[in-house]
Amino acid sequence: MASTSGLCRNGGNTFNLIFTRSMRRQKPKQGKPPVLPPSKTVRYHVVHVPWQKPEYVEELLWRRHVYNNAMVSLIKVFKEEIKMKEEQGMGIEALKEQEQVELDELIAQNEERNRQAAEERKIRDLQRQAEVKQLILEEVEEKLDVEYQDAEMRTKEVLAMIDRSANFVTKENLEQRILDALEKPTVFDYCINLKGDKYYDPEPVKYQTGTPTRQKGRIYDRTLGFTQQMRSADVRGRKHDVKDGDVKDEDATVTDQESDVKSKDAVEKQKTKVEESS
């Protein structure tokens, strides 16, 4: 569809403008104009009653009339019954009141049952709390018993350590302990030969006596001296005495005594020399 507008001037010439805005619009379909509303057959389901004979139509109309009269009479009877029940206190309002009363009774019974259940639950909770409290107390007692036993054992250990601490070497008694060890040394070293005899290491001397022998073997090797042999002979002599009676090995005891006297004399001489020099 084309349309024209007014004149347009360009210089001294004039010409018409043609608008082609609606030229591509499609033509509407042939039929009812779109402005009119839809018909009843489109909006509703129209029932087309088939054709019947006049006799059938009269019979059906009569039956419908009888049915309607019966329905009217039934409605009247029902209304009269409802009115009579209302007068006797059995109407709808009375039924509503009766239902309300029953509902109130049921609610009261439910509340009473809930109250009893709450009391029973409270009793069970108290019993459970008592049981839990008893269990906690038992666990606490067991733990305390274990701690008491542990504390008692630790106390005994501490007391025993305090008793042993009298012989401990501390910074205060270090010098005195060194002097005591030099005066009274304790030797635990010994050797055993193939015969099973024990040779104890001699006690170290505080002062050097005589000229020490030159070490010819390894530095820390030491050959058992005369005193060890005498001690082993003394041990064997004692064993022999126990077997044969009161027989004694006199030679071994004499040599042992002589060696002890010599060592004592040498120690005393060395002490006197040290005192004179000081």
Image (spheres, rainbow, N blue to C red):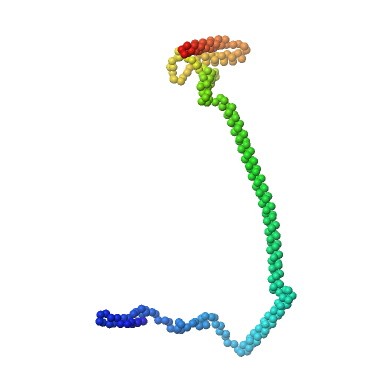
Q: Quadrant of residue 4?
A: bottom left
Q: Is residue 12 above or below residue 266?
A: below
- Residue plotted at (51% across, 25% down): 171
**Which x, y percent locates residue 75?**
68, 80
Q: In what quadrant of the picture does the N terminus appear?
A: bottom left
Closer to the camera in the image, 8 or 250: 8
Q: Is residue 203 left or right of residue 26?
A: right
Closer to the camera in the image, 118 or 228: 118
Q: Is residue 121 above or below residue 69?
A: above
Q: How many marks?
A: 0
Query: In this view of the protein, can residue 104 be seen by the observer?
Result: yes
Q: Is residue 130 left or right of residue 268?
A: right
Query: In this view of the protein, can residue 181 be seen by the observer?
Result: no
- Residue plotted at (33% across, 82% down): 5
Q: Quadrant of residue 74?
A: bottom right
**Which x, y percent locates residue 269?**
49, 11
Closer to the camera in the image, 82 or 55: 82
- Residue plotted at (54% across, 81% down): 45
Task: Residue lying at the far bottom in this picture: please name it.
Answer: 54
**Which x, y percent locates residue 266?**
50, 11
Q: Is residue 119 above or below residue 92?
A: above
Q: Is residue 37 left or right of residue 10?
A: right
- Residue plotted at (47% across, 18% down): 222
Q: Is residue 273 above or below residue 20?
A: above
**Which x, y percent locates residue 105?**
71, 64
Task: Residue lying at the far right in this picture: please name it.
Answer: 88
Q: Quadrant of residue 231?
A: top right
